[in-house]
């Protein structure tokens, strides 16, 4: 009887050993790299940088490590438009036992010029030492360079209003304080983020005398409910007398479900019937850096 028990014990032991070895030799899950979809609208100056945050399902692939990367570009979907960029800083952190967070900080490898650049959807393209290429959708990207303008409108306040439209934290609108330095009446005629998918809705332009902070409720500031998909159909204009100042808030209409990383604000106005612009640059206090990997995520493709 004992030899029979020993035989079954040995069979069970070898079967368990073979199963364990098979599990050790099984292929790891396919690499998955993805990133939140964002608006990056940049008023370009020399040495301008921007950040892309990537989530990967492993830390143990060569394709998540800086040493294996050889070339970086921004491209459109077909690769017919490219913008050279330089990786300035790289950080790889373990998110948990199975995934990693990668922070890539890039500098635009171009001289400041008057030529604008716009891609939507934009892709981060990374080429590796083995000639494999990662094509990662990142959202909407634009940059503009402008020479200094003679403006008769100054800003005294610039505060983004943060909120959530159900797919992660984003910017729901912006409040701006302005003061006229003109000897003539001024009429505000338009506001732009230099984006084609996130548009200030001039129908809801509202003056306010409230103290503004980023976590205020947008509907309270506008004094009426606002839907982020509402198009502008009857834009309002705002008039200022010589030397007059005001604060106004304006919501953003979203054509796509994007988060917002940074943007300038361009205000078009008439001064004595002459068209002029005020540009509020994308200063650090007017940027929203996503602290988490929330938002609409899209996967990259290794080619």
Image (tube, helix red, strand yellow):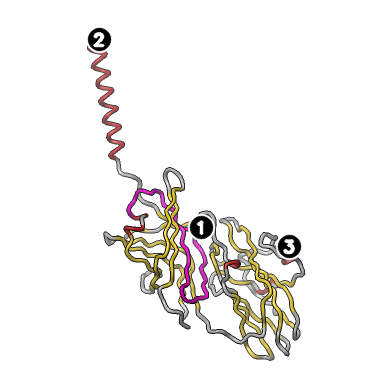
Circle 2 packing at 10 Å, graded few (<14), some (14-19), many (20+), is few
Name the residue beneath numbered marker 3: 220
**Which of the 4 quarters of the picture holds residue 192?**
bottom right
> Quadrant of residue 10 in the image?
top left
**Vertical placement of residue 120 versus 181, above or below:** above
Q: Is residue 84 left or right of residue 9?
A: right
Q: Secondary structure at mark 1?
A: loop
On the image, numbered disc 2 is attached to which residue?
A: 2
Q: Position of residue 1 (x, y in %)?
A: 25, 8
The residues bearing labels 3 and 1 have C-alpha atoms spaced at a distance of 27 Å
Residue 43 falls inside the magenta stretch: yes
Residue drawn at x 49%, y 73% as measured from the top left: 142
State the extent of the magenta-drawn residues as a range.
35-62
Q: Is residue 115 above or below residue 169?
A: below
Report the disc number at residue 194.
Answer: none
Residue at left offset 27%, top offset 62%: 131
* Helix, strand or loop under label 3: helix
- The vertical placement of 242 against 282, above or below, is below
Query: Between disc 3 and disc 2, whose residue precedes?
Result: 2
Q: Secondary structure at mark 2?
A: helix
At which x and y percent is residue 236? Answer: 70, 77
In the image: residue 251, left or right of residue 83: right
């Amino acid at each position: 009887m004992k030899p029979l028990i020993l035989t079954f014990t040995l069979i069970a032991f070898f079967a368990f050993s073979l199963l364990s070895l098979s599990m050790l030799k099984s292929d790891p899950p396919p690499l998955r790299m993805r990133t939140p979809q964002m608006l990056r609208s940049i008023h370009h100056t020399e040495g301008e940088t921007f950040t892309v945050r990537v989530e990967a399902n492993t830390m143990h692939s060569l394709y998540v490590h800086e040493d294996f990367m050889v070339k970086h570009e921004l491209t459109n979907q077909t690769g017919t438009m490219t913008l050279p960029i330089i990786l300035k800083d790289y950080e790889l952190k373990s998110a948990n036992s199975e995934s990693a967070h990668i922070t890539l900080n890039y500098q635009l490898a171009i001289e400041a010029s008057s030529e604008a650049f716009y891609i939507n959807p934009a892709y981060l393209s990374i080429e590796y030492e083995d000639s494999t290429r990662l094509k990662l959708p990142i959202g909407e990207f634009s940059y503009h360079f402008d020479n200094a303008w003679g403006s008769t409108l100054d800003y005294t306040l610039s505060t983004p209003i943060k909120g959530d439209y159900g797919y992660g934290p984003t910017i729901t609108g912006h409040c701006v304080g302005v003061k006229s330095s003109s000897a003539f009446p001024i009429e505000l005629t338009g506001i732009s983020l230099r984006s084609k998918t996130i548009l200030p809705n001039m129908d809801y332009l509202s003056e306010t005398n409230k103290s503004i902070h980023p976590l205020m409720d947008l509907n309270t500031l506008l004094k009426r409910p606002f839907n982020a998909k509402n198009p502008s159909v009857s834009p309002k204009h705002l008039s200022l007398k010589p030397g007059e100042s005001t604060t106004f808030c304006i919501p953003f209409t979203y054509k796509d479900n994007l988060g917002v990383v940074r943007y300038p604000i361009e205000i078009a106005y008439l001064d004595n019937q002459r068209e002029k612009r005020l540009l509020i640059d994308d200063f650090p206090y007017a940027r929203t850096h996503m602290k988490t990997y929330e938002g609409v995520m899209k996967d990259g493709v290794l080619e």
